[in-house]
Image (cartoon, rainbow, N blue to C red):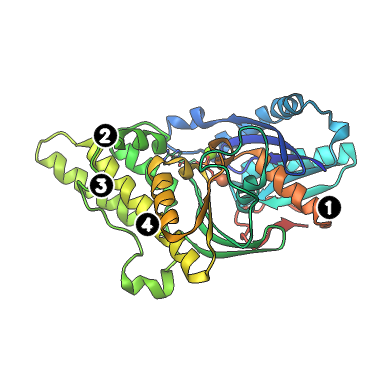
Amino acid sequence: PLVLGIETSCDETGVGIVRGRTLLANAIASSMDEHARFGGVIPEVAARAHLEEMNPTIERALADANVTLDEVDAIAVTCGPGLAGALMVGVSAAKALAVALDKPLYAVNHLVGHVGADLLQGEGLRGTVGEIGELELPTVALLVSGGHTSLLLVRDLVGDVELLGETIDDAAGEAFDKVARLLGLPYPGGPQIDRAAADGDPAAIRFPRGLSLPKDQAKHRYDFSFSGLKTSVARWVEKHVETGAAIPVADVAASFREAVADVLVTKALNACADLGVPRLLLGGGVAANARVRELAQDRALAAGVELRVPPLSLCTDNGAMIASLGAQLVMAGCVPSGLEFGADSTLPVQQIQVR
Ligand code: ATP
Ligand code: MG
Ligand code: FE
């Protein structure tokens, strides 16, 4: 089926078009620059930008895919989780399209969409971790972005997704952004820290690994915590500034990045080992992090776990992943969503589709 997917959960207006598992278009407009001077996403600004970008982005996706709206078999849209006002723009646009075109509508979960991104095929889509085959299930999935840090067990993309653990405070991307600000680096902080860390010593400072002590294993083995790490970096920097010395930005960035990468990869591979699932999928903006990718590759190889990382353009928020999940729902014969659903900012991951 030819499916058009709309994503507006955060600061990316994404419209993707797929035919089954084949990627045809992935048009994105980001309002990131408008948020930069605030150091984080401002919901009201994001919603307004979605409103402005929605129609042009749909047009661009159709042109890229070289298809017309009449040819589209179904519409898919992110209905949660995310920023309520931002989600509402995508949901309204999708409903309007579905009614005007008289096409079935599928309201889907953003987080499960991130996993759907990994199904897509197309020219140049593989290669980050070598030539790998079809996505096999079950798989463990680690989704890390500015808004989420979630460890999932996916048994069936359209029927059975389990939340193993998640962050109990800040998301990993949020920690990158906050620590970058502390170091005087611009927003978004992830890529900045990544770049600065390349010249630093990851063992220079031993920052804490959240929820990784023996006492945490019973209740929080698969949960994450990054606010203690952020505070620890802040204290270290404050103390250092008091001595009058310049901050060794590269060493702090490298040591911080190491702490995040270590805890993310350790917990994800613990889940693979505990559950006997030899597959791990990474997704979300933080999956772009060079050290996270490297450490995941090295340790997965050593543990006999197959690692999958979609290309960057499909890791960050996009419409193609939503179209991909929509196409899976269509192919599985799932009932469309109707028009009663609304945006749900806290939609739980177990709820793959909202009817
Ligand atoms: P959501 O949480 O709803 O998916 P988002 O906009 O936060 O929304 P993404 O666009 O997937 O999610 O990711 C953006 C986040 O990823 C930002 O916090 C950014 O700092 C982080 N990020 C991007 N590149 C890197 C990198 N190389 N290293 C670490 N973090 C990165
Ligand atoms: Mg984003
Ligand atoms: Fe996301």
Whether label 2 touches label 3, CB < 8 Å: no
Q: Which residue is mark 4?
A: 263
Q: Residues within 10 Å of mark 4 (few under 14, many from 20)?
A: many
The residue where tag 3 is placed is 234
Kindly state the secondary structure of the residue where label 4 is placed: helix
Residues at marks 3 and 4 touching, judged by CB atoms closer than 8 Å: no
Q: Pointer 1: residues within 10 angstroms few (<14), some, or many (20+)?
A: some
Q: Position of residue 284 (x, y in %)?
A: 52, 45
Name the quarter showing ligand 3: top right
Tag nearer the camera, 1 or 4: 4
Amino acid type of disc 1? Gly
Structural distance between the alpha carbons of marks 3 and 4? 19 Å
Q: Which residue is mark 1?
A: 338
40 or 232, which lies in front? Answer: 232
> Crowding near pointer 2: few (<14 within 10 Å), some, many (20+)?
few
Label 4 to label 2, Cα distance in Å?
21 Å
Labelled disc at residue 199: 2
Residue at 27% x, 46% y is 255
Residue in view at x 84 percent, y 41 percent:
98
Q: Secondary structure at mark 1?
A: loop
Quarter of the image where the N terminus is located? top right
In the image, residue 21 lies at what x, y percent?
A: 73, 43
**Looking at the rendering, which quadrant does residue 63 occupy?**
top right
**Secondary structure beneath disc 2?**
loop
Hey, what amino acid is under mark 3? Ala
Foreground mark, 2 or 3? 2
Pointer 4 or 2: first along the chain: 2
Q: Amino acid at mark 2?
A: Asp
How far, Cα to Cα, is label 3 from label 1? 49 Å
